[in-house]
Image (cartoon, rainbow, N blue to C red):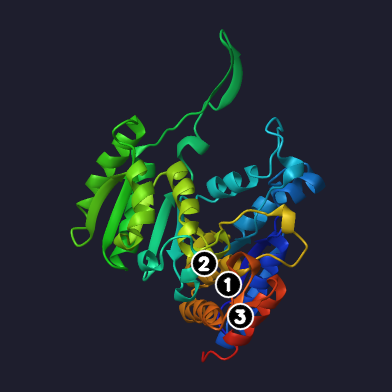
């Protein structure tokens, strides 16, 4: 038995607890079949933490995250906390965890499963073979810049947000993207708005400097508005895409059109810290939101959470064979025609969140360790 990995699990709000439970049970089955140990420690963040502790990210939860080898996180938020004038908001937990743990690189794979080609609103001929990876800078840019405030000026109400980057912040995420591209198809696109923004001009300058360290990787720049178009018109042209925080947030949600549903998009947030297993400390979460309208109704798609758990097995727990097996189980379930409501097709079997997770585990049990 290999060294036990400690996983901090924060189920979150809305459908978060439902999908995270299915992911957790998949990890437990992987541990059993591939002979490694996991220890779960549970805390709360987001809206649940606001109600229970008066803070979106209680000190105890932050400490739990720091002392663990990986973090598995459900979505946070809900209508009861949507007032923009609230001082404490669920999303503060995400920003606090990312910055507090130094998780500056957000990996969002966009893989189009052949079985789901008809689900997308785009033509199947555009989607066949799409397999790209977004690397989004996660701890800088406009989401963290100061000042960020609303105020009253001489012309009435006004607001300011600040988009700021240092060369070090840019270089480390671009270098991470180059390393990932080197292990894939050796193509990297950097997305910016260098024709308008000073921050993007620095981004482009630093990206070209880092590119000289990777002569084996094909590299080019794209303006964000052009990328928004090419992502839907020529998605097969891309391998790894690196961009700043807000652009990455928007483009990866747009990319959900390729996969057919946000319920299919996993993510990993990584930094430079190593855990007790000698792997990268990381936080893993589905890209979708808390979907409070379907919470507790067994309607959610757990596959993004399960695929996030597969990324956790790969990057933080040192279990690449288990990660591959879990990803293959998801693919086989889709090929066999099992569907949740968000990816439902004619002549496919409609199931709920719990049953979809159970079907994936039944497939996983057939995998040879």
**Mark 2 or mark 3: whose residue is earlier in sequence:** 2
Mark number, residue 75:
none
**Residue, x 28% and y 67% (percent of image)?**
185
Residue density around tag 1, few if under 14, some if 14–19, many if 20 or more, within 10 Å: some
Viewed as shown, does residue 241 lie left or right of 255?
left
The CA span between labels 1 and 2 is 7 Å
Q: Which quarter of the image is occupied by the N terminus? A: bottom right
Mark number, residue 360:
3
Task: Give the percent coordinates (x, y) of residue 99.
Answer: 54, 45
**Mark 1 or mark 2: whose residue is earlier in sequence:** 2
Residue density around tag 3, few if under 14, some if 14–19, many if 20 or more, within 10 Å: many
| Mark 2 in CB contact with mark 3 (< 8 angstroms) | no
| Mark 1 in CB contact with mark 2 (< 8 angstroms) | yes
Disc 3 element: helix
The quadrant holding residue 298 is bottom right
Which residue is label 1 attached to? 345
Q: Nearer the viewer, residue 113 or 322?
A: 113
Residue 234 visible in image: yes
**Mark 3 or mark 1: whose residue is earlier in sequence:** 1
**Residue, x 44% and y 68% (percent of image)?**
112
The CA span between labels 2 and 3 is 20 Å
Q: Nearer the viewer, mark 3 or mark 1?
A: 1
Viewed as shown, does residue 61 lie left or right of 182?
right
Task: Give the percent coordinates (x, y) of residue 336.
Answer: 55, 84
Mark number, residue 119:
2
The CA span between labels 3 and 1 is 18 Å
**Residue, x 49% and y 80% (percent of image)?**
328
Please determine whether, in this image, residue 176 is positioned above or below residue 330. above
Task: Give the percent coordinates (x, y) of residue 291.
Answer: 68, 54
The quadrant holding residue 81 is top right
């Amino acid at each position: 038995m290999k060294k036990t990995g400690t996983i901090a699990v924060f189920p979150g709000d809305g459908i978060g607890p439902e999908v995270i439970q299915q992911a957790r049970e998949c990890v437990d089955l992987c541990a059993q079949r591939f002979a490694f140990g996991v220890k779960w420690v549970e805390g709360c963040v987001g809206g649940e933490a606001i109600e229970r502790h008066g803070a979106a990210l209680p000190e105890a939860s932050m400490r739990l995250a720091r002392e663990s080898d990986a973090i598995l996180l459900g979505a946070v938020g809900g209508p009861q906390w949507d007032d923009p004038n609230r001082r404490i908001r669920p999303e503060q937990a995400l920003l606090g965890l990312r910055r507090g743990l130094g998780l500056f690189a957000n990996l969002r794979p966009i893989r189009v499963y052949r079985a789901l080609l008809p689900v997308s609103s785009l033509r199947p001929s555009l989607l066949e073979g799409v397999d790209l990876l977004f690397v989004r800078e996660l701890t800088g840019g406009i989401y963290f810049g100061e000042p960020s405030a609303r105020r009253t000026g001489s012309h009435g109400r006004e607001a300011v947000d600040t988009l700021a980057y240092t060369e070090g912040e840019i270089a480390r995420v671009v270098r991470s993207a180059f390393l990932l591209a080197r292990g894939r198809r050796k193509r990297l696109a950097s997305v910016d708005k260098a024709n308008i923004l000073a921050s993007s001009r620095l981004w482009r300058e630093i990206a070209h400097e880092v590119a000289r360290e990777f002569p084996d990787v094909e590299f080019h720049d794209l303006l964000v508005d052009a990328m928004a178009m090419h992502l839907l018109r020529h998605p097969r042209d891309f391998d790894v895409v690196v961009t700043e925080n807000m652009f990455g947030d928007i483009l990866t949600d747009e990319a959900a059109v390729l996969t057919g549903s946000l319920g299919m998009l996993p993510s990993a947030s990584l930094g430079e810290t190593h855990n007790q297993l000698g792997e990268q400390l990381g936080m893993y979460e589905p890209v979708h939101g808390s979907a409070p309208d379907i919470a507790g109704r067994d309607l959610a798609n757990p596959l993004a959470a399960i695929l996030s758990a597969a990324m956790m097995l790969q990057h933080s727990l040192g279990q690449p064979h288990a990660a591959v097996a879990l990803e293959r189980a998801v693919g086989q379930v889709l090929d066999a025609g099992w569907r949740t409501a968000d990816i439902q097709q004619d002549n496919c079997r409609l199931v709920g969140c719990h049953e979809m997770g159970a079907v994936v585990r039944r497939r996983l049990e057939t995998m040879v360790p």
